[in-house]
Image (cartoon, rainbow, N blue to C red):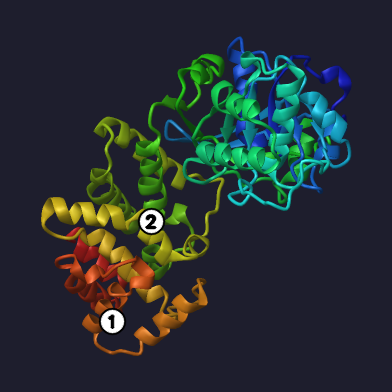
Amino acid sequence: MNGFGKDCVVVRPVRVIQFGEGNFLRSFADWIISEMNKRTEFDGNVAVIQPLKYGNADLLNRQNGQYHLILKGIENGLPVRKIERIDCIDRTIDPYADFDAYMRLAEVPELRFVVSNTTEAGIAFDSGNLFSDMPAESFPGKLTQFLYHRFQFFKGATERGLIFLPCELIDRNGDMLKKTILQYVRLWNLGDAFEQWIGSSNVFSNTLVDRIVPGFPRDTVQEIRKEIDYDDALISESEIFHLWVIEGDPVVKREFPADKAGLNVLFVPDMKPYRDRKVTLLNGTHTVLSPVAFLYGLDTVREAVEDPLIGKFVRKVMRDELMPSLNLPAEELELFATDVLDRFRNPFIKHQLTSIMLNSFSKFKTRDLPALKKYAERNGRVPEGLVLGLAAICVYYKGGKWGENLIEPKDDEAILSFLQRVWKERCFYNIAETILGSVSLWGGDLNEIKGLTEILSDKLAVIAEYGIKKAVCNFLGE
């Protein structure tokens, strides 16, 4: 098989520095940049920084920054599979092995964007980091060193500031990154002029990213290598669906023309409605469908949405109970809901229900409880589909044998112990009242929501006495 020779490298100016060389950024941000290079005048390559001591920098460099991405999913109702070659990575630098090369990158005049995905724990302040470290251990510490060198090299020129597009899955990630960098500026006494330059000449965008990336296709890699005729060690797989919501300064849209490339990248003044949309319609639906489908005897999300009964339950909860809680145009929500259902039906991804049910109570609290409360306030009654999902979670956490399956819930030990104690009670009303009254679970007493205790106890009783199918049929009126 052939390799990725230097003759395959496409020479463009380095306009993006990327912290992270893992599957997600290579399947999301680098793919988007490749598409912009094809379809717009962006004309920019990426310099990848390995953020940890151990990573794939050497492997990427051996392949001259190139690899293949397998895109799989549903388009226009039909399954689609595509193979694309990503060629926008110019170089990969390990700052632990070559700190000088990392600093020299700050001197590149065309550099304009910083993309990162260092996990939720990556944007954190560690006072033990020193400015003299080569490099600082934390990601924001490394960035502060980089920015200070750029500030000095270009003598504080305002036009040499950068635009930050963090992909870490934390709320208001850009604000958090800026705050943490400024903590290092003050800890290391780097001066008021530099601090002012950080605030006035750089843009820190809050972003929301969404794409399922299973990663390296271990089961089919040999077949793929034969198909592409390359011994690619960095093949990655992802779904076709993608979404990048970028909040803030209009300059970002002008300089990062992903929307002009026909990509699902939204530049918005406020990302909160879009974050709420994803958390509610995608994650919230996941949270209630999973225990119901599991108790029904299914294994995967795809099986759930394609089952005649459970699929009907999923669509009704999504459209009648979750969607009305969101503050976006109905047409936009309907389009997003259709995309979510297509993603759930993706024949190439096996999303196990049990993996979604990890920490189900905390997920229900953040993803579904806000919609439940809004529904109750607006309609004077609780949404029975969401309550049925909560009841199924409660039954799942009881553990033990369920049909042919052994239920083994995974959560904080205190929550598991609490549910075990609760289920020693024989009265379903008392079980519902105790669970809803747990301040440690919910941050308050949910028994105060009119009708919730009664409806939850009824759902628990039906599931226990007649099974989940009867409870779903009652909800659907069948």
Q: x, y (%) of residue 239? A: 55, 39
Are there few (<14), some (14-19), or many (20+) residues within 10 Å of tag 2?
some
Residue 390 sits in which quadrant? Answer: bottom left
Residue at image mark 1:
431
Closest to the observer, 161 or 276:
161
Q: Secondary structure at mark 2?
A: helix
Query: Where does the C terminus fall, quadrant-wise?
Result: bottom left
Q: Residue at x 31, y 36 (%)?
A: 333
Whichever of labels 1 and 2 marks the residue nearer the N terminus, that label is 2
Which numbered mark, 1 or 2, is in the foreground of this view?
A: 2
Query: Where does the N terminus fall, quadrant-wise?
Result: top right
Q: x, y (%) of residue 447? A: 21, 71
Residue 98 is left or right of residue 343, and the answer is right
Residue at image mark 2:
366
The kind of residue on which mark 2 rests is: Thr
Q: Is residue 95 above or below residue 84?
A: below
What residue occupies the far top of the structure in this picture? 41
Residue 372 sits in which quadrant? Answer: bottom left
Q: x, y (%) of residue 48? A: 74, 32
Q: Is residue 223 above or below residue 447?
A: above
Q: Residue at x 73, y 31 (%)?
A: 146
The kind of residue on which mark 1 rests is: Ile
Q: Secondary structure at mark 1?
A: helix
